[in-house]
Amino acid sequence: MPQVRRLVVPLVLGALALALLVGCDGSRARGDDGEPDRVDAVEPPTLGACRDLTPADVAQSSNATATVPCSRAHTAQTYVVGALPSSLVNAGYDSRALGAWAYRTCSARLMRFLGADESLLMRSVLSWAWFRPSRSAWDAGARWYRCDVVGGGDQSREYADLPTSVRGQLLGKEDDDWMVCASGRTVAGSVKIPCSQPHAWRAVTTIVLGEKDDPYPGDRLVEVRTHDYCSDSVGAWLGYPASYSLGFTWFHRAEWEAGNRRSVCWAETDR
């Protein structure tokens, strides 16, 4: 039986999930490069528009950062714009129901946009952010939403530039420019980087912990199941060597209630 070394159990959030799920302070709707006429816009934004967003921009509930031509450097592209469903018209601005709906909607639509399944998306450096109208526009009756694909995740210090369009970027392939790796001694202590850069860890698989209607089993059980399943999964990915090190990322009740049933398994590898 191979000897397994478990170096890290990172308790991190994935896909910008928790901050976006519960909502953030929307008092800063734009940065210095914003479009003043869009700050409190009631009409929906433009589908397909590109912007140079930062993690600070994504931390806000609304956004009016100026658009840029997609042929120029940009870190975000709007891939979904629409009206909120009638069931959420009377929802609170920061309600969990609104955040959970956005989580499911933006995740599913991003998979279609990129050509990825859920496992591939969770192991990618590409992620999504969603925005709603400003509080003033919300109070005036605006009920649109916007999903942007961004070149980074919740632990990114800055976002990578995107190609002119990322539509189909992950279709049928694992491109190291967009797959997520880590370079530190442990996964938890590392800034996540594209696997095309020198690295020590790679997110190699995801494992399923429950079905759609299953109740949240609790933090301890999720952690234990994740370790057990990832041990087998990483061993198989590495070809069952005599010894190996693994890490894993598991998620909490908020992500479970939003629809996530997966944990991410990491292998210590430079390939």
Image (cartoon, grey):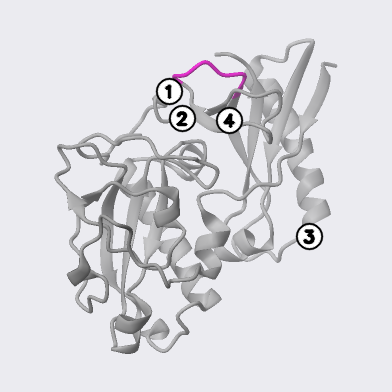
Q: Is residue 161 left or right of residue 45?
A: right
Separation of residues labelled 4 and 2 (CA atoms): 8 Å
Residue 259, can we see it? no
The residues bearing labels 2 and 1 have C-alpha atoms spaced at a distance of 5 Å
At horizontal 26% and vertical 64% (from top left) the residue drawn is 81
Residue under label 4: 203
Q: Where 206 falls versus 3 (above or below)?
A: below
- Helix, strand or loop at label 4? It is strand
Identify the amino acid type marked 1: Asp
Determine the CA span between mark 3 and mark 4. 24 Å
Q: Residue at x 67, y 31 (%)?
A: 187
First-in-chain label (4 vs 2) = 2
Quarter of the image containing the N terminus?
Answer: top right
On the image, the x and y values in percent for residue 54 come to: 39, 48
Three-letter amino acid code at the position of disc 4: Ala
Which stretch is magenta?
A: 196-201
Q: Which residue is mark 3?
A: 218
Judge from the rendering whether residue 147 lies leftward or rightward of residue 164; answer left or right: right
Q: Is residue 197 magenta?
A: yes
Q: Which quadrant: the C terminus?
A: top right
Q: Which residue is mark 1?
A: 176
- The disc placed on residue 118 is none
